[in-house]
Amino acid sequence: MSSKHHHATDETLMRYAAGTLAAGPAIVVEAHLAGCPACRARIATYEAVGGALLEEIEPTQLSETAFNDVLAMIDAEEEPAQSPQSRKPVEIEGVRLPDALGGCDIGRWRWIGPGMRMSRVGVPHDPDANLILLKIAPGRALPDHGHAGTEFTYVVAGAFTDRFGTFRPGDMAEMDEDVEHQPVVDRDGDCICLAAMEGQMRFKGFIGRMLQPIFGI
Ligand SMILES: [Zn+2]
């Protein structure tokens, strides 16, 4: 019996390759890519197609500024961050976190509800990024929630199950605003997830919806 794996959607991988995904979701995708050769292969295809399209554009059709922007983007991609900080394993209270969080500021676990803790993740190159770590206790159901925007989740440790299946370490979930789902954490351990939303206000809405059924506000 093979275990089921959950991947990034085509749209998300294309946006990641094009550099148009917001910083938080891009880090969630990067965490998944590190352990998923299948999605890395799909990314390589999109990048090749994108490069071929770029080559077909006559340089004179691009304004000088735009052309320089493209060159700057290519330069930036060829220089991976190599600061000592980004090479140090990232962890929170002994739990190893994805390398994609290298250079990020990981806050302490904070109580947000019974069996639920949250750590805000600071992204140096985008202070407005909505990126959090969630630690949910075994057997606990997250409040049934819809979404104001697409929610990107990467499983760091443990597992949760919703009507789309079981999500294990390395799996990625994308839930758009039309999806109602109720994840339940498996009984054999805490589930730690990296979660990101697109858009600044939606983060408050998401937390608000999580807390609403608990506090009855
Ligand atoms: Zn994948």
Image (spheres, rainbow, N blue to C red):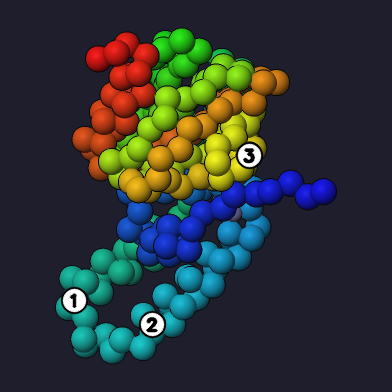
Q: Mark 3 — residue? A: 166
Depth-wise, is mark 3 or mark 2 nearer the camera?
A: 3
Q: Mark 1 — residue? A: 64
Q: Residues within 10 Å of mark 3 (few under 14, many from 20)?
A: some
* Quarter of the image with the C terminus in it: top left
Name the quarter showing ligand 1.
bottom right
- Please report whichever mark, 2 or 1, sits nearer to the chain's N-terminal start: 2
Tell me which amino acid carries mark 3.
Thr
Q: Mark 2 — residue? A: 53
* Percent position of residue 136, x then y: 53, 20
The answer to whether residue 20 is left or right of residue 11 is left
* Percent position of residue 41, x then y: 60, 65
- Please report whichever mark, 3 or 2, sits nearer to the chain's N-terminal start: 2
Tell me which amino acid carries mark 2.
Leu
Q: What's the mark number on residue 80? A: none
Tell me which amino acid carries mark 1.
Glu
The answer to whether residue 185 is left or right of residue 126 is right
* Percent position of residue 77, x then y: 43, 59
Identify the residue at image location x=61%, y=39%: 167
- Please report whichever mark, 1 or 3, sits nearer to the chain's N-terminal start: 1
Dot 3: what SS? strand
Q: Is residue 78 visible?
A: no
Residue 104, quarter of the rendered image? top left
